[in-house]
Amino acid sequence: MSLHKRAVTALGLVLSIAAMPMACSDTAAPAGPVFECQLPSGSESPDFLQTIGCNGDFQALASEPLRADLPGARSVKVVLDQADGNALYFQNSVLYKIHYEFASKHLSGKDLPLVPELSSFNTTEYYTPDRRFVLGAVTYYEGPKVWALEIAPYDTASAAMITTLYKKVAASAYFGGSLFFHPTSDAVSVEADKLGDDVPVKTTDELYAAIDYQPLSLGSSMGRLRFLKAADLEDEYVSHEDIVVLDEAPNDISVIQGLITEEFQTPLSHVNVLSQNRGTPNMGLRHAMTNPALRALEGNLIELTVGASTWSVREVTLEEAQAYWDEHKPDPVVLPTLDLSVTGLWDLEDVTPEPASGASLRDAIKQSVLAFGGKAAHYSILTRTENVPIQKAFAIPVYYYDQFMKQNGFYDQIDALLADPTFQADAAVRDQKLEALRDAMEAAPVDAAFQALLKDKIAAEYGTHKMRFRTSTNSEDLEGFPCAGCYESHTGDPTDWPDVLEAIRETYASAWLFRTFEERSYYGIDHKSIGMALLVHHNFPDEEANGVAVTANPFDEAGVDPAFYVNVQYGGDVEVVAPPPGVTSDQFLYYFTQPNQPITYLTHSSLLAEGERVLTTAQIHSLGVALDAIHARFSPAYGPAAGNKGWYAMDIEFKFDDEAAPGQTPTLYIKQARPYPGRGSE
């Protein structure tokens, strides 16, 4: 293994951190001159001020930052005009959401140089040393009570420019004596290292440690408030009428109305993706298990609201809750009808044919799902996508799952379970009898002709390498019922053929996991309509890194700050989407489309020493190239090229592995691509 590591002295923007909104009273005393409010109470907000004399002035101009990776903050953009004697402007950030809008209206022409069109403005004012403007923002973080001057992660402003801007802002605002500079990317951190002692720096680690609220899936819901430990979920049953507070993020949870975890989560954790798919609120809250506002309502019916900046709870009546449940119960989902006519073992290149000219990629994927499931249908597209490295793979059609179920009488057993009133009424009974069904499936015989076909395929093309059998169903990665993490994949060793059969049976049996069954029941799905194909490729025995990524910035659904979000962990022993308690991973935003491609680290892997990184810069770039290609490739199916005017991104799983060249720098392999549901809205 040869993953590169390097030290970092300051970190990037805070991801998904939030706090209660700033109070209406001043929170920082001036360290130097005495300031007076510039705006009379009740006056209209101006386009700009050149002095912030009190909190009322700041609030009149402030907005929530456009990027939702800064929730809970209030921010005012600042413009320093070096062509006009370093005149400083605190712009109204509600009226003018970006610097260009303000500068082009107020600082162009007459006695001042003309402001060029937007593209030239962005190129000049963020990337050139002889720029006219120095652009930034003053942000107040309520949790840590910090005033922070920030520049864009991709801004190449020098330490001298930052110092000039900092001193001008500090001298022009009542909070100047409490102002810090907050580096927003690795590149900005390099310049921050050059700042003098008169420009104090506050890192993301320091901000993050003082923040207690993490909004993840936004929205409101009603349910009965319950407190549990994540470990209790093995024995305790939760209901779709519950809102649950846990000490830590679980790897999995049945359908509930809302989730609060004392330990912060990652945006691509299984439980958060589940929450987004279900449209239920999800948040992290430090000390949630002892929070007085929550404990006072334990056992009661409540409404939980998770917003980008704040959270709230209120007690509701049974009538309110019942009306909410009735209104928000999802319409029954009808799964695509299986195509059981497709037999044989299919190389991935052939699973989803390239659509003919003028035909729809979306329709081609939908057709492929009928025989090969969502995972294999999407993965097949990657075999013909340039700059996307993947493992050689093949698919086992859903026909063989159906064959296995019929030959062993399992559909009849399922009919008997569904007709049993006790099974329907008692979660503990369902759990017990589903476990018995899985045990029977894991011991059942597998068709001899299918075994011979599979054995020949693996021997001829894959040798003795261990094989990974991955679920690919008609009930995952789909609109209406994505069911992320519903099923379990397993590995088998071809040199020990019973091990291969065990892997296949265990994978098939995962269709009948308790949580998965409950999920289908909540969505009104006919349980017997599910079909499981298998995506098969070499297993990664000892990868150097495993990760997930989103091909757009999930905290910027307005599209003003495009970036890739990446969550990656050292090695392969700790799954990045379901880490053990207390284990963190490298999380970062990668501004791939910006000229200097800055990286904003949000958290770091707890499996590495301080200052070490999971991936090298070159590895991150190779990942960015692949993410960019995948984003463009699936746009005709799910994005702007398909007429989608909303937010669009693909959810990617990847590995870095040195198997092809042991001892060399591990290389990238893409494992999966599927549509990403987005964060939700208030």
Image: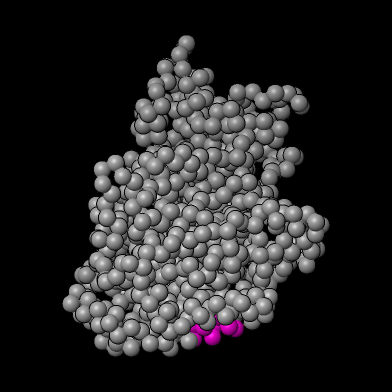
Up-down relation of residue 189 to residue 37 (above or below) = below
Q: Residue at x 60, y 31 (%)?
A: 94
For the image, the number of numbered tags is 0
- Quarter of the image where the N terminus is located: bottom left
Query: Can residue 436 be seen in this snapshot?
Result: yes
Name the residue at the left extreme.
460
Q: Position of residue 100 (x, y in %)?
A: 47, 27
Q: Residue at x 67, y 68 (%)?
A: 239
Q: Residue at x 74, y 54 (%)?
A: 323
Closer to the camera, 94 or 539? Answer: 539
Closer to the camera, 627 or 24? Answer: 627
Up-down relation of residue 644 to residue 395 (above or below) = above
Which residues fall within the magenta stretch? 432-439
Query: Can residue 607 be seen in this snapshot?
Result: no
Tell me if 396 is positioned left or right of 244 in this view: left
Q: Position of residue 257 (x, y in %)?
A: 66, 61
Q: Residue at x 71, y 32 (%)?
A: 56
Q: Position of residue 367 (x, y in %)?
A: 36, 56
Q: Does the magenta run of residues contain 582?
A: no
Prevalent SS, magenta region: helix
